[in-house]
Image (spheres, rainbow, N blue to C red):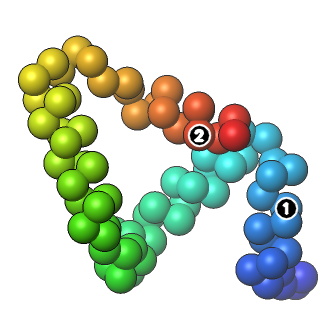
Amino acid sequence: MNIMNKSDVLECLPRLNSHDRLEIFSFLCAFEEEKDFFETSVPTVEEKQLLDRELEAYQKDLDDGVPWDEVMVSLLKK
């Protein structure tokens, strides 16, 4: 078995198509549920304030958001 280190993975990710990157992202997100993968990732004070402002704006106009699948496609194109 050929094992890739983190640098190898990061180097290869941009060469994958958006479907493959989304599959990898989904796989990594599954770790959150199983292993508390993102437990140590806590938003900064500034990030929390931004999230709170965005949530408040969204709650004022629920139709103003973008569906998650559209957000993911947009992110994967970058």
- In this view of the protein, which residue sits in the foreground, 5 or 51? 51
Coordinates of residue 34 in the picture (x, y in percent): 36, 75
Q: Tell me if residue 53 comes above or below residue 35 in the rendering.
A: above
Q: Position of residue 26 (x, y in %)?
A: 52, 54
Estimate the spatial distance between the alpha carbons at disc 1 and disc 2, rounded to whole Å. 17 Å
Q: Quadrant of residue 78?
A: top right
Q: Residue at x 69, y 35 (%)?
A: 77
**What crowding class fits label 2: few (fewer than 14 Cα within 10 Å), some (14-19), or many (20 or more)?**
few
Residue type at mark 1? Cys
Q: Residue at x 57, y 55 (%)?
A: 25
SS for dot 2: helix
Residue underneath mark 2 = 75
SS at circle 1: helix
Tell me if I can see residue 19 in this picture: no
Q: Position of residue 73 (x, y in %)?
A: 59, 32
Instruction: Give the camera-side residue of 66 and 32.
Output: 66
* Label whose residue precedes the other's in the sequence (1 or 2): 1
**Callout 1 touching callout 2 (CB < 8 Å):** no
From what the image shows, is residue 38 above or below residue 61?
below
Q: Amino acid at mark 2?
A: Leu
The outermost residue toward the front is 46
* Label 1 vs label 2, nearer the camera: 2
Q: Which residue is mark 1?
A: 12
Q: Quadrant of the N terminus?
A: bottom right
Disc 1 residue crowd, few under 14, some 14–19, many 20+, Cα 10 Å = few
